[in-house]
Image (cartoon, helix red, strand yellow):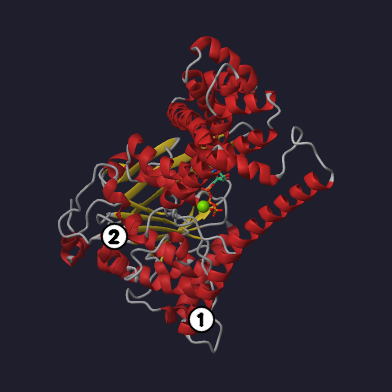
Amino acid sequence: MADVAILQSGQGIDAAEAEYRAAQRRRRLRRRIMPAAGVLSVLVLWGLLVYGFDVPPFVAPSPFAVAQTLVENAGMLLANLWPTALEAVLGFLLGNAAAIAIATVFVHKKTAEEAFFPVVVLINTIPVVAKAPILVLLLGNGIEPKIAIAALICFFPTLVNMVRGLESVNPQAMELMRVLSASPREVFFKLRVPTALPYLFSALKIAASTAVIGAIVGEWIGSTVGIGALIIQATYNFDSALLYATVIVGSTFSVLFFLAITGLERLVVRWQAPVVA
Amino acid sequence: MVTQAALLDPAVAEAPGAPAIRCDDVAVRFITERRTVTALENVSFEIAEGSFLSLLGPSGCGKSTLLRVVADLVPPTEGRVTVLGGSAETARRDHALGFVFQDAALLPWRTAIQNVSLPLEVGGRSVLPPGSPTPTELLALVGLSGWENAYPHELSGGMRQRVSIARALVGGPKVLLMDEPFGALDEITRDHLNEELRRIWQETGTTILFVTHSIYEATFLGQTVLVLAANPGRVREIVPIDLPADRTLDIRETDHFMRIAARLRRLLGEA
Ligand SMILES: Nc1ncnc2c1ncn2[C@@H]1O[C@H](COP(=O)(O)OP(=O)(O)OP(=O)(O)O)[C@@H](O)[C@H]1O
Ligand SMILES: [Mg+2]
């Protein structure tokens, strides 16, 4: 993020700029070091608790046991991550594409919104764990129900945000478009879509993590591969180290997915005023 | 379409023709859930082509509404609006109107030059009429050369307003409608932009309808001041401003200017 520096009186522009850059470097470094320090202290605390209270390995593993499992079973863990990642990403694309398409229809046809928005809200009130078996019955045991669950879980927040974004157009900008005799299509692409982008991205960032949750929950029901299946197996076998390692692999993927969307947002939404630290 | 050159030609500009804007007994009523508001009642006036009319009146007297009626943004409930000899809608569709909003209404995701170019991207007008200034030239006209690639959030309020004026001038509109464009600015910036606006008006020969709260601004800018009275909004008086065409801000200190301002103040007080 670009921060704003204020030029002090009696200070040369070069000096001020150098100082600004140095401050920015320090800030950036801090932003990396502090989270790392936080993670490290949690790991230390975890190790101390497990060793100090002599916790048996089937209840909770030590950080070292988890690290060892991560290294030794890396191949197997990644092999199981692959289907989950595929389901999550495909579900993400499908769910969000559907949400954006339906939001577009809702904005153009108020009657459609009035008729179907309540239906969407109703479906959204069914918890994922209840939707999952229904979809497995409907779509079989393959990858399809998992994609469908991931898609459904992404769908609702994106739909709501996208409709809000498309409708939160500045009324004067709307009048400007009319003075310019812009067609509805031009109003949509030149005004509504750019207005909606920040709203869309805040939904997509939520969807990036929830899509992975959706895929994992889908795998809990009748699946032999994937992070979700591995979690169930490890739990039944009291293999706490493998359970933790699996959870870590799953969350790492979630975080990377989230960061990818954040990076995309930075590329696309460049116009917001810089947030002054 | 009259080209820029023709508009600048005094022979054309001074030719007595049909008025640029004409309102006959215009009334506008807004029906809301709780009540019906008569924003305008019995409003009749006309503006000659190439002239500058200031619209002055207390808050809520329907100034913005009158501008919106002329811009075909609000249909009149009664009466008739004629713009450039035709309906307001025809004038809008022919891209003969420019509108400057109070808060600039720039699109935040577009740079200054992209904002000025917007009128060329929508409404089926992809090419400029021959001879009319390009967006880059218009930014220079409002004193913003070098700021082409700045985003609105990187500009000051005064600069944003200049960008929006440049945008309204794209394609050489014959009528420029300005709704308190300098209302949110400090006095010094406002003075400066007032002088610039008079210069732009003299250079382009555009007909300008300018809404303001400020007696001084109305007097300094206009050839004529239309004073509106409130509740319901109606024409209080049409005051010709017999000040020389070449004005600088110093004119505001002359007795003549003061007398006109005092008269407008009285009219507003009675309004
Ligand atoms: N879209 C609308 N719906 C309902 N009432 C409206 C609408 N637009 C304007 N009005 C009403 O019409 C009247 C005139 O409004 P208008 O905005 O034209 O006043 P104005 O002279 O521009 O005021 P100001 O100087 O404060 O901008 C007001 O009473 C206002 O409440
Ligand atoms: Mg107004």
Q: Nearer the viewer, residue A142 or A17?
A: A142
Does A221 sit left or right of A190 as displayed?
Answer: right
Query: To which chain does the residue with label 2 belong?
Result: B
Q: Where residue B206 is drawn, which disc sits there?
A: 2
Across and down, in percent, residue A137 comes to 54, 10
Q: Position of residue A268 (x, y in %)?
A: 41, 49
Quadrant for residue A179, please give it. top left
> Label 1 is placed on what type of residue?
Ala
Q: Amino acid at mark 2?
A: Thr
Residue A63 position, x and y percent, is 69, 46
Q: Which residue is mark 1?
A: A16
Q: CA distance from mark 2 to mark 1?
A: 46 Å
Locate residue A87 relative to residue A247 in the image: left or right.
left
Instruction: Return the residue found at the far top.
Output: A137
Residue A53 visible in image:
yes
Judge: label 1 CB < 8 Å from ligand 1.
no
Q: Is residue A106 above or below residue A72?
A: above
Q: Nearer the viewer, mark 2 or mark 1?
A: 1
